[in-house]
Amino acid sequence: MATQIIDGKQIAKDVRKKLKPRIAALLDKNIVPGLAVVLVGEDPASQTYVRSKGKACERLKLHSVTIRKDASISQEELIAIVEGLNADDKIHGILVQSPVPSHIDELAVTLTISPEKDVDGFHPYNVGMMLLGRGALLPCTPNGILKLLEESNIDPTGKEVVIVGRSNIVGKPIAALLMQKAKIGNATVTVAHSRSKDLAEITKRADILIAAIGLPQFIKADMLKDDVVIIDVGVNRIDDDSTEKGYKLVGDVDFDGCFEKASHITPVPGGVGPMTISMLMENTVTAAEKINGLS
Ligand code: GUN
């Protein structure tokens, strides 16, 4: 069977297109969904993400505010910024780009974000609601993965899903979502990570493998069974003198080596990444609707 490349760019575009009538309905009521992104420090990858988020808002004509702060900002100052955004009626979504400098307690900042404006889905209220299967604002990358599976007609019901990586942003929430009694759910989920023994024995069980461990090209063909669905969440910069920037982006999966084994595979870039941004736009629109009592 020929391997299908899952086109995250196209699916992300379709998600944005479906948002347009919802945005128009809000505009009819003089409501422009607004997203505020707070970026602390100069991390190059974070700067790229934040620019993409701003551009996505611009394209959908959403109100977008980016607040850039020096890495020396105190926790109190950062919390005061979030409190200001909580009180701002033009802002429906607040995102503090992760990671923040080590002197700042990220959880303390997340706890300050009003749960109804928490478009990352990181606030414990939203994490709890997600676990209960009642989440309204789901974390963007996991939600994007659900969408990629749905749009590729991949039903996880009864399948063995192996997630490699246990982060709060991806591994833990995608595990919770895929085991849920839901349209895209009902899977038998295993979460493996850097401390798992015999990792290859675990990954070989996967009908659907989700790689989110943050190590370039870590998943090799001999760790997989035939016809596996591969979702690669990794975004790693590796040196490449042949490119203008001197680096290239690769995933957590050895794409070329694993391609033949897979029934479906997401590329990096152009797989999960664009979905994260589109789901953020969707959450911003959902938050604007809910805050205004429209859904
Ligand atoms: N850093 C990497 N991914 C994310 C994300 O989805 N949200 C935030 N806030 N920071 C990130």
Image: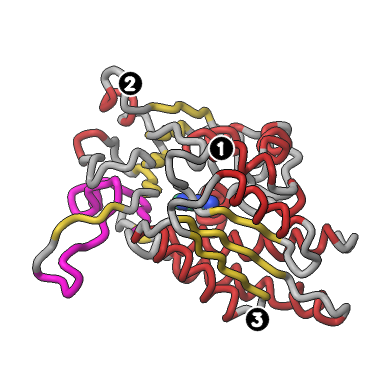
> What secondary structure is found at the residue carrying circle 2?
loop
User: Is 262 colored magenta in this rendering?
Assistant: yes
Amino acid type, label 2? Ser
Say few, some or many: other residues with alpha carbon within 10 Å of mark 2 (under 14 / 14 to 19 / 20 or more): few
Q: Is mark 1 on a helix, strand or loop?
A: helix
Q: Which of marks 2 and 3 is nearer the N terminus?
A: 3
Q: Which mark is residue 173?
A: 1
Tell me the amino acid under the disc marked 1. Answer: Pro
Q: Give the position of the C terminus as an image quadrant.
A: bottom right
Q: Distance between the residues labelled 2 and 1?
A: 19 Å
Tell me the residue that label 3 is attached to. 61
> Distance from label 3 to label 1 (Cα)?
30 Å
Residue 233 visible:
yes
Color scheme of the displayed model = secondary structure
Judged left or right of residue 142, residue 5 is: left
Residue bearing mark 2: 196
Q: Give the range drawn in magenta.
A: 242-267
Q: Which of marks 2 and 1 is nearer the N terminus?
A: 1
52 above or below 129?
below
Q: At which x and y percent is residue 125?
A: 73, 37
Q: Which residue is drawn at 60% across and 55% down?
A: 95
> Tag 3: residue type?
Lys
Q: Which residue is at a point 15% across and 58% down the rendered structure image?
A: 239
Which one is in front in this view, the residue at disc 3 or the one at disc 1?
A: 3
- Among numbered discs 3 and 1, the one appearing first in the sequence: 3
Element under disc 3: loop
Q: Is residue 271 above or below residue 17?
A: above
Q: Where is residue 190 in the image (x, y as percent from the top left)?
A: 45, 26
Q: Residue 256 carries which label?
A: none
Asked if disc 3 is less than 8 Å from ligand 1, the answer is no
